[in-house]
């Protein structure tokens, strides 16, 4: 096939989920302005009926997307939602698609960053698919710096010339000067200093986690570094559930995904909203136009 300028590839995701119907709806909205190619097979899988066959089809689409990205046939990839549980049953050796793409492009899991980019809140996650116990135990200065650097880079590509970034504290009230924990003093503050040196930007923190997202929503910060998965995803989805996009920063390619799962319970009913997938396609196209420097 002839290569098309800035062709955005879309993987079907688990065919038993809402991915197929969302892609049909999304293409009716963006297909005339953005060149999109979809990979993935329905086979005999029925909507709302997850199976090993569906999980294997989702994995096959992911593998094909890597081939097309390496061939430069695609300038970006957007992933339809998959079931981590069913992929695991099918032998998929990664906790999520973020880690899959990291491995595929020669990156370690701690060299990429999951970002949640919405119209009102932009968040970087220091850790992703770990238990809370593991995330807290494994919190490191270098990972906070890496996440902040990646967030700053994407914000600049989105038009923020000198982005203002806040780094969350880990403990209630950001530790209250050591009363509720030592992580702020021993890990987060040194990371904030290191991030300032790396970026030469306005970096604030550690900030109290119970107010920092509200402050960002009000416009005080352009982005927030959250220290673990739910610390960042809960406010992001609360504010912008229908329009937030999952972006993997640190890859040599553009990779985006909607911020929701397979929703097997409503698959095939025609009621799933395509807004997040549409936002993901548009953002992937936009980032492909402004490559990382």
Image (cartoon, rainbow, N blue to C red):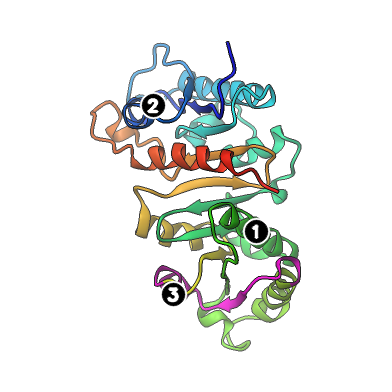
Report the disc number at residue 204. none
Side (left or right) of 56 relative to 249: left
| SS class, disc 3 | helix
Q: Which span is picked out in magenta? A: 197-218
Where residue 52 sits in the image (x, y, percent)? 49, 22
Mark 3 / mark 2, whichever is N-terminal: 2
- The residue that label 1 is drawn on is 147
Where residue 172 sits in the image (x, y, percent)? 51, 79
Nearest the camera: 64 or 169? 64
Q: Quadrant of residue 34?
A: top left
Asked whether 201 falls inside the magenta stretch, the response is yes
Is the Cβ of the residue at disc 1 closer than 8 Å to that at disc 3? no
Where residue 148 sits in the image (x, y, percent)? 64, 62
Whole-number angstrom distance, CA of label 2 to CA of label 1: 33 Å
- The residue that label 2 is drawn on is 31
Does residue 64 appear in this view? yes
Nearest the camera: 140 or 21? 21
- The residue that label 3 is drawn on is 215
Where residue 108 sits in the image (x, y, percent)? 74, 44
Q: Residues within 10 Å of mark 3 (few under 14, many from 20)?
A: some
Does residue 96 appear in this view? no
Q: How many marks?
A: 3
| SS class, disc 1 | helix
């Amino acid at each position: 096939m002839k290569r098309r300028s800035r062709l955005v590839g879309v993987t079907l995701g688990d065919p038993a989920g809402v991915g197929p119907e969302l892609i049909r709806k999304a293409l009716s909205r963006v297909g005339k302005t953005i060149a999109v190619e979809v990979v993935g097979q329905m086979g005999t899988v029925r909507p709302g009926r997850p199976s090993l066959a569906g999980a294997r089809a989702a994995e096959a689409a992911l593998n094909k997307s890597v081939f097309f990205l390496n061939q430069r046939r695609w300038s970006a990839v957007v992933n339809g939602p998959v079931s981590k549980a069913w992929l695991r049953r099918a032998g998929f050796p990664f906790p999520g698609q973020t880690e899959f793409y990291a491995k595929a492009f020669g990156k370690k899991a701690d060299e990429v960053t999951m970002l949640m980019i919405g119209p009102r809140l932009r968040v970087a996650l220091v850790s992703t698919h770990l238990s809370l116990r593991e995330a807290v135990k494994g919190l490191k200065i270098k990972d906070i710096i890496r996440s902040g650097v990646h967030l700053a880079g994407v914000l600049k590509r989105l038009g923020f010339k000198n982005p203002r970034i806040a780094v969350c504290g880990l403990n209630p009230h950001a530790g209250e000067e050591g009363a509720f924990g030592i992580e702020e003093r021993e890990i987060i503050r040194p990371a904030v200093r290191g991030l300032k040196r790396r970026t030469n930007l306005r970096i604030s923190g550690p900030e109290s986690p119970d107010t920092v997202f509200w402050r960002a929503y009000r416009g005080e910060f352009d982005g927030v570094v959250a220290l673990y998965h739910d610390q960042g995803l809960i406010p992001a989805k609360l504010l912008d559930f229908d329009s937030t996009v999952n972006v993997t920063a640190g890859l040599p390619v553009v990779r985006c995904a909607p911020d929701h799962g397979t929703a097997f319970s409503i698959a095939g009913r025609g009621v799933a909203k395509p807004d997040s997938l549409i936002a993901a396609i548009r953002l992937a196209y936009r980032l492909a136009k402004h490559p990382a420097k």
